[in-house]
Amino acid sequence: MERISSLQNPRIKQLLRLQAKARERREQALVLVEGAREIQLALSKGYCPEQLFICPELYAHSDYPGLVGEIADEIKTELSLPVFEKLAYRKGSDGLLATLRPKSHLLEELVLSAHPFIVVLEAVEKPGNLGAILRTADAAAVDAVIVCDPLCDLYNPNVVRSSVGCLFTVQTAVCSSQQAFDWMRRHKINILAAELQASQWYHQTDMRLSTAIVMGTEADGLSSFWLNNADERIKIPMRGYIDSLNVSVSTAVLCFEAMRQRGFR
């Protein structure tokens, strides 16, 4: 197995560019994924690794000791600890990095249940929020997350990290708001817009049939497009001094209310 111990190695420079720049990820059609759990989840959903980088000193303490053995030897490269630490995005890494080919994330590829529950995000800009929402979506077993007009890259390293790999387990589509709206109308999905000034409480809204909740940005909320085209506008009661929750927390509240209404099935 090849071992890289120099930060000047061209392959290391390529990985640093992949980590730092969305443009580089698009041009190379590659994403960099850190962590054994995240890589294992990606593999379980059909992603194929192009390269696997291993730091033996860190991987020796991994909770996934058998993962490396599942991957072909010819794509494995060993990294020295200083080189791996330069590439690692988070503290306490378990010594694995992989490059993967991203998926297309088209609306037409989504597979829905009989009465789907969908999360729609408009103009999400913070990777940490997007990752946290994907983690919630996995926990609540929502049918899909649709990201409309995003202001951050779906494969930003912080999305992967904050989603703890749920980016790979949740069906995700990326499109414009108009495309999402037209698609939901074709599938007869009831659209609920989360809005601070809404008159209807979320827990008094029926979410048992085909439903989508549409979440806006923390700074500006939803655009007039979604407010005007939603079937209903709903809000979460706020009893303190602050008038809103973090968007990922609001999404979790609404998702699990839908799951409660559906008997957690």
Image (tube, rainbow, N blue to C red):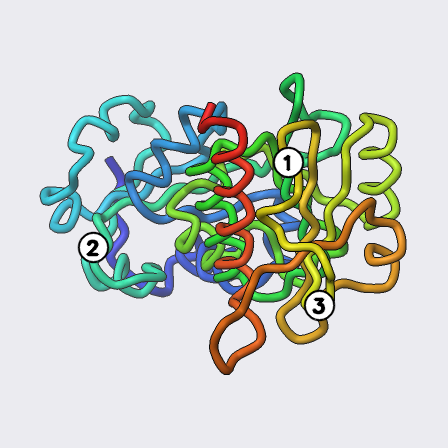
Mark 2 vs mark 3: in front: 3
* Image location of residue 49, percent across then percent down: 44, 32
User: Residue most toward the bottom?
Assistant: 241
Q: Secondary structure at mark 3?
A: loop
What label does residue 221 carry, if any?
3
Task: Say which quadrant the N terminus sits in.
Answer: top left
Label for residue 54? none
Q: Quadrant of residue 135?
A: top left
In x, y percent, where is residue 55? 21, 48
The residue sitting at 63% across, 43% down in the picture is 119
Alpha-carbon span between mark 2 and mark 3: 46 Å
Q: Earlier in the sequence, mark 1 or mark 3?
A: 1
Three-letter amino acid code of the residue under disc 3: Gly
Q: Earlier in the sequence, mark 2 or mark 1?
A: 2
The residue sitting at 27% across, 40% down in the picture is: 2
Disc 2 target residue: 80
Q: Decide: is 242 above or below 60.
A: below
**Nearer to us in this view, 47 or 147:** 147
Residue that lies at the very extreme toward the top in this rendered image: 114
Question: Is residue 91 toward the left or the right of residue 17 in the image?
Answer: left
Categorize mark 2 by other alpha carbons within 10 Å: few (<14), some (14-19), many (20+): some
Q: Nearer the viewer, mark 1 or mark 3?
A: 1
Residue 172 found in image quarter: top right
Q: Earlier in the sequence, mark 2 or mark 3?
A: 2
Q: Which is nearer the eye, 102 or 127?
A: 127
Q: Which residue is mark 1?
A: 207
